[in-house]
Image: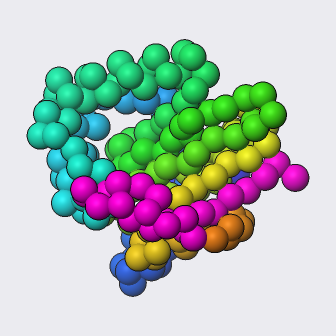
Amino acid sequence: MAGSERRSQLARTSGGREEPATSATDFHLLPWAEVDPNESLSLLLANREHLSRWEPLRPDSYFTASGQAELLSTVQQAVRAGREHVAGIVVGGRLVGRVALTGIERGVFQSCHLGYWVGAEHGGRGHATRAVSEVVHFAFVGLELHRVQAAVMPANAASLRVLKKCRFRSEGLAEAYLNIQGRWEDHLIYARTAD
């Protein structure tokens, strides 16, 4: 597809909205170290309530410039150590979300965990699906991992749709799997393997 080509057709989102379809060049994953910290903080603050149903309890300091700088430092250390790969989801030059491979283990396991989110105003447009598809391809081809696993709360229908579109298989229910907002919540386990 031509890099500078823009489509004039409209794309219907899952919410019924019609918006200009994005071309291949409008979407990319940006290494988290290259994401503008002010832009990431702004996106996080705008989506604090939206994300709170699915996230662990966070101290107020997490939602500050210094808290995000600390997170960036932690991510950079983990990336250098080969334990994580984190990227911003950028559409039309704007940061709209984040996708991450974490807990990368080598040896006989060759596996990692997948996490992702897209801001509320950007949901239902396929951005999370595309980001997950690209990062999973990178996990298998670039990192030569064998398995990518994701855990999703049963009520998170949007996230479950993303995993199904990206050909993850259901592996069952993990009871009291993660502490979300101070409560141990059940999660559905999904995975893909390189084969």
Taking depth in this image into account, of 182 and 137 the one nearest to the observer is 182
Q: Nearer the viewer, residue 103 or 136?
A: 103
Q: In the figure, 170 relative to 75: above or below?
A: below
Work out whether 149 lies above or below 29: below
Is residue 88 visible in the rendered image? The answer is: yes
- Frontmost residue, 83 versus 93: 83
On the image, which quarter does residue 34 sit in?
top left
- Is 180 left or right of 146, judged from the image as shown? left
Instruction: Name the residue furthest bottom.
Output: 16
Q: Which residues are magenta?
A: 173-195
Residue 106: x and y, percent? 73, 29
Horizontal and vertical percent position of residue 176: 43, 63
Q: Residue at x 57, y 70 (%)?
A: 173
Q: Residue at x 36, y 43 (%)?
A: 95
Q: Residue at x 55, y 30 (%)?
A: 84
Image quadrant where residue 32 sits = top left
Tell me if residue 13 can be seen: no
In the depicted structure, whether residue 13 falls above or below residue 22: below
Please state the horizontal and vertical placement of residue 128, each as a whole percent of the image.
50, 58
